[in-house]
Amino acid sequence: MTDSADLSEPCKFDLGRLRAAISAERTNARITQDEAAATIGCSRKWISRFERGLSVPNFENVIAYASMFGIGIYMDIPKTVADLDLPSRGVSKVE
């Protein structure tokens, strides 16, 4: 991977950076979009649109696609979130 697309260190999630890293890895590995799509079980069109940033990606596909190249996606979920204390619109708070 190139330095500009290096995702080896934890960082704030950046979908554009992730797209670039995955696309670069696929290209460097000489894997076609058709081959990548067959491997993760999606369409070539999804791969193309994802790499070009033209669609909101299906998270399961993104995880599968990234894992093809050893790129991990990690989430750090805070212990408390202020918004969780507020009831949703039209739903009463369960005690």
Image: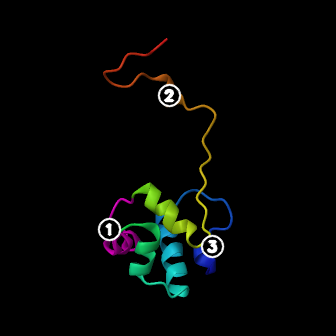
Q: Which residues are magenta?
A: 43-57
Check disc 3 and give the amino acid type: Asp
Q: Is residue 95 magenta?
A: no
Q: Secondary structure at mark 1?
A: loop
Image x and y of residue 23, in percent: 48, 77
Say which residue label 1 marks.
54
Label 2 vs 1, first from the N-terminus: 1
Q: Are marks 1 and 3 in contact (CB under 8 Å)?
A: no
Q: Residue at x 45, y 23 (%)?
A: 86
Check disc 2 and give the amino acid type: Leu
Which is more toward the observer, 67 or 73? 67
Figure check: 64 above or below 89:
below
Q: Within 10 Å of the Cα at label 1, are there few (<14), some (14-19), or many (20+) other Cα atoms?
A: few
Say which residue label 3 marks.
6
Q: Residue at x 37, y 74 (%)?
A: 52
Say which residue label 2 marks.
84
